[in-house]
Amino acid sequence: MQNIALGWLILMITNSPFLLGLNGFLGQIPALVFALPGGAIADRLNRRKLMLITQSAMMLLALLLAILTSFRQVTITEILLISLLTGVATALNYPAYQALIPDLVPHEDLMNAIALNSAQFNMSRAIGPTVAGLALGTLGAAACFYLNTVSFLALIIALLMITIPPVQKRADPRFWSAMFDGIRYINEHRLLIVLLTVPAFLSLFGLPFIVLMPVVARNLIKVGASGLGYLMGGAGVGAVIAALAIAAKGAIEHRGRLILTSAALFSLSLILLAGAHTFWWAFFLLAVMGATIVGTLTLTNTTLLMTTPPALRGRIMGMYYMAMSGMLPFGSLQAGAMAQALGTRFALGFGGTVCLVYFTIVQIFLNRLRQSGQLSRVSNSSS
């Protein structure tokens, strides 16, 4: 809700696609700086306490944004600063959040747990933008920010209620040594590097379509604030369907192929969205994009968690978050600048084309490795 309302508010204040991209850049750049240290912290400290601190910080920032908007005192400078600080809290929160999941479920249920976690997250993406669009049209942007503030209470209460079993004490005495242990592990498993490039490329060229959606809704599809909420709700609906399907399936073979196939379908849908002129066609494409992006990221996330030693999960999830969100600020910036200079349709089509070409090349590369037998060891360890 806050993301939709914030994008619309920036567009109303500045009428600048570039500033939409800049806001996305500042909100996500902390992932590049703090995700890996956040992963090391998550492997050394109490993950529940770390999440309580970061969630409380995000709640207070949302409240500040709501108050400033209510009293018509908000400026683009304050919006950008709040986005930056929220990004810092999110970057420190995410590795602990993901690393906590394997502590709560047996290994054989990990795929289902991650998929169900993705389902509840994406269900909020289906409901939130729709409610945001309605609230924007009737109550204004401040109402979305107040509702977001209240929503953090549910997560804080849940963190206080859940029972977390004791885990092995993380005894690495040196913070920087602990952080680089994760980098060394990835370097020793080169195909995991290939796996991490999938969310990195999506974040750099594919996912920045989100920051341009206010322009798509207002200028290209011409549906206004409520229509923007419904369009993003379409992406959320597709995401929920995909997440529930993965959870119902349980164990999935050939995850590598499915990851790349889903990523390629997302890229093709983004190219088609660049040429969309009607609401229902755009809604359908966004639903496909929501489903395929969840398929790609859920399977990538699961593969990393299932092949990572428990003591390194926080750091590996930090690198996953760095790949997924650390590239997103640069993607948001390039998408906003390209839309400003060459048009929104060109920016969307360019991003989709680059992604499609890259994932096709990776698929060809992995097929050749598979034929030579070099993938057998990794495939066995991740199945």
Image (cartoon, rainbow, N blue to C red):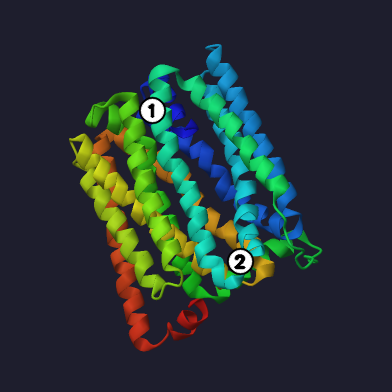
Q: Circle 1: is it few (<14), some (14-19), or many (20+) Cα within 10 Å?
A: many
Please, what secondary structure does the residue beneath circle 2 have? helix
Compare residues 21 and 157 and report the one nearer the observer.
Answer: 157
- Residue 3: image location, x then y, percent: 46, 34
Q: How far across and how far down the image is residue 147, in percent? A: 54, 28
How crowded pointer 2 is (Cα within 10 Å; few <14, some 14-19, many 20+) is rated as some
Secondary structure under tag 1 reads helix
For marks 2 and 1 on the same chain, the one whose residue lies earlier in the sequence: 1
Residue at image location 48% in from the left, 80% down from the top: 378
11 lies above or below 91: above
Question: Could one spot residue 353 in this view of the protein?
Answer: no
Image point (47%, 32%), residue name: 1
Q: Quadrant of residue 319?
A: bottom right
Q: In the figure, residue 248 lies in which quadrant?
A: bottom left
Q: Is residue 176 left or right of residue 138?
A: right
Please tell me whether mark 2 or mark 1 is closer to you in this view: 1
* Residue 100 in sight from this viewpoint: yes
Q: Residue at x 26, y 41 (%)?
A: 283
Q: Which sits in the foreground, 34 or 8? A: 8
Amino acid at dot 1: Gly
Image x and y of residue 144, in percent? 49, 26
Horizontal relation, residue 92 to residue 108: left or right: right
Residue 343's quadrant in the figure? top left
Q: Residue at x 63, y 33 (%)?
A: 59
The amino acid pointed to by label 2 is Ile
Q: Which residue is mark 1?
A: 133
Residue linked to disc 2: 183
State the separation of the CA atoms marked 2 and 1: 42 Å
Q: Position of residue 230 (x, y in %)?
A: 33, 34
